[in-house]
C-alpha cells in the first residue's frame, strides 16, 4: 500500500457542490471517501455559489472529520461544473486527483485499486465501471462498463464518452498541461479527455465496479432539450475539427443523440438501460 504521509505520495479528492444538492446525498458521498482503504491526503470541496444552511451543516461536519486535509473553496456565484472544477484543480495539493460527485458513493477499495493501476501502467487517466441506482445501491441491474485499454478507449471516444467521470483518477500535471477543466455545459469532462488523449495521455478503465452512481435525481432528464442539443452539436463540431471523426460519423452522432434528446425523459431513461448499459448479472 502507498504511504499517504506526504502530499507527494497521496491523492486529492476533488468535489463540487451547489445549492440544489441534497444534504443527505452529500454526507453519504463524503462518508464513502472517508471509508476508503487508502485514505486521501487532501480533500477539496468547491462550493459553486451560495449554499443553504442544510448543506453548510454537512460541510461543517466534513471539516471536523477531515481536519487539516479539508479545503473548502467558495465561489461567490454559481459558475457551472467545468469552471468550478477548474478552480478546484488549483487547490489540489497532491499529484493525483480523484474526482467524486456530491451524490454518488465510492466503494471502499476504489482509490487503492485505481492508484495501483495508475502506477503499474503509468496511466494519466484511470477510470472504472459504475453501477447505477435510484434510491439505494443495488436497486437496479444497470452497469456502465467502458473499454479497457488505451487503444480501445481512443477508438470509443469517437462515438461516446470513454470514461465515467464520477469515478476517474487523474494525474494533475497531465490535466493542467492540457488546459484543465473548461466551461462546456454537459461535456466538460469529455472535452478534457479528448484534449488529453490527442496529446498522448494514456487511459485505462478498470472493468470492475468501483462506484455506485445515483440516477434518480433527474440525470437523464438533463440529457434532453434544445440547449443540450445545441451543446451536443457544438461538441461534435469540435471532434470533427480535430479530425477525430469525419462527416459521416459527425452526422450519425448528431442525429442519434438529438433523437434521444427530444423524446420524453422516462423513455430516454429506459432506452439507456436497454441499449447502452450492461446488466449486473453479466459481471
Image (cartoon, rainbow, N blue to C red):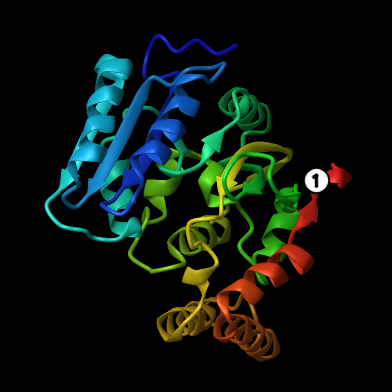
Image height of 120 relative to 4, above or below: below
Q: Which residue is found at the position 69% from the left and 40% from the top?
A: 138
Q: Which residue is found at the position 69% from the left and 84% from the top?
A: 249
Question: Which residue is nearer to you in this view: 38 or 181?
Answer: 38
Residue 77, percent across and down?
15, 57
Residue 144, percent across and down?
70, 52
Residue 18, percent across and down?
28, 51
Question: Which residue is nearer to you in this view: 239 or 13?
Answer: 13
- Packing grade of label 1 (10 A; few <14, some 14-19, many >=20) is some
Question: Which residue is nearer to you in this view: 104 or 52?
Answer: 52
Q: Which residue is found at the position 49% from the left and 61% from the top?
A: 195
Residue 154, percent across and down?
68, 60
In the picture as drawn, the residue positioned furthest to the left comes out as: 76
In the picture as drawn, the residue positioned furthest to the right comes out as: 282
Judge left or right: residue 58 versus residue 122: left
Judge left or right: residue 113 versus residue 28: right
Question: Which residue is nearer to you in this view: 91 or 217?
Answer: 217
Would you name the residue on which mark 1 appears?
A: 280
In this view of the protein, can residue 120 be seen by the observer?
yes
Q: Which residue is found at the position 51% from the left and 62% from the top?
A: 219
What is the quadrant of the C terminus in the image?
A: top right
Image height of 124 relative to 64, above or below: below
Amino acid at each position: 500500500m502507498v504511504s499517504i504521509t506526504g502530499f507527494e505520495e497521496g491523492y486529492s479528492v476533488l468535489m463540487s457542490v451547489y445549492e440544489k444538492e441534497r444534504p443527505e446525498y452529500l454526507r453519504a458521498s463524503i462518508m464513502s471517501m472517508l471509508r476508503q482503504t487508502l485514505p486521501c491526503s487532501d480533500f477539496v470541496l468547491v462550493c459553486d455559489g451560495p449554499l443553504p444552511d442544510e448543506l453548510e451543516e454537512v460541510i461543517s461536519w466534513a471539516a471536523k472529520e477531515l481536519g487539516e486535509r479539508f479545503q473548502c473553496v467558495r465561489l461567490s456565484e454559481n459558475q457551472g461544473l467545468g469552471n468550478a472544477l477548474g478552480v478546484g484543480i488549483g487547490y489540489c495539493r497532491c499529484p493525483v486527483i480523484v474526482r467524486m460527485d456530491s451524490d454518488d458513493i465510492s466503494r471502499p477499495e476504489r482509490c487503492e485499486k485505481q492508484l495501483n493501476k495508475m502506477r503499474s501502467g503509468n496511466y494519466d487517466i484511470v477510470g472504472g465501471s459504475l453501477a447505477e441506482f435510484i434510491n439505494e445501491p443495488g436497486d437496479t441491474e444497470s452497469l456502465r462498463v467502458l473499454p479497457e485499454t488505451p487503444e480501445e478507449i481512443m477508438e470509443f471516444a469517437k462515438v461516446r464518452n470513454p470514461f465515467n467521470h464520477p469515478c476517474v483518477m487523474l494525474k494533475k500535471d497531465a490535466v493542467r498541461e492540457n488546459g484543465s477543466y473548461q466551461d462546456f455545459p454537459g461535456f466538460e469532462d469529455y472535452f478534457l479527455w479528448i484534449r488529453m488523449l490527442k496529446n498522448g495521455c494514456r487511459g485505462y478503465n478498470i472493468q470492475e465496479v468501483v462506484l455506485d452512481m445515483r440516477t434518480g435525481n433527474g440525470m437523464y432528464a438533463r440529457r434532453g432539450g434544445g440547449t443540450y442539443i445545441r451543446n451536443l452539436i457544438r461538441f461534435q463540431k469540435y471532434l470533427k475539427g480535430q479530425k477525430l471523426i469525419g462527416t459521416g460519423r459527425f452526422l450519425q452522432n448528431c442525429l442519434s443523440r438529438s433523437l434521444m434528446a427530444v423524446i420524453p425523459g422516462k423513455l430516454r431513461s429506459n432506452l439507456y438501460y436497454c441499449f447502452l448499459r450492461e446488466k449486473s448479472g453479466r459481471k
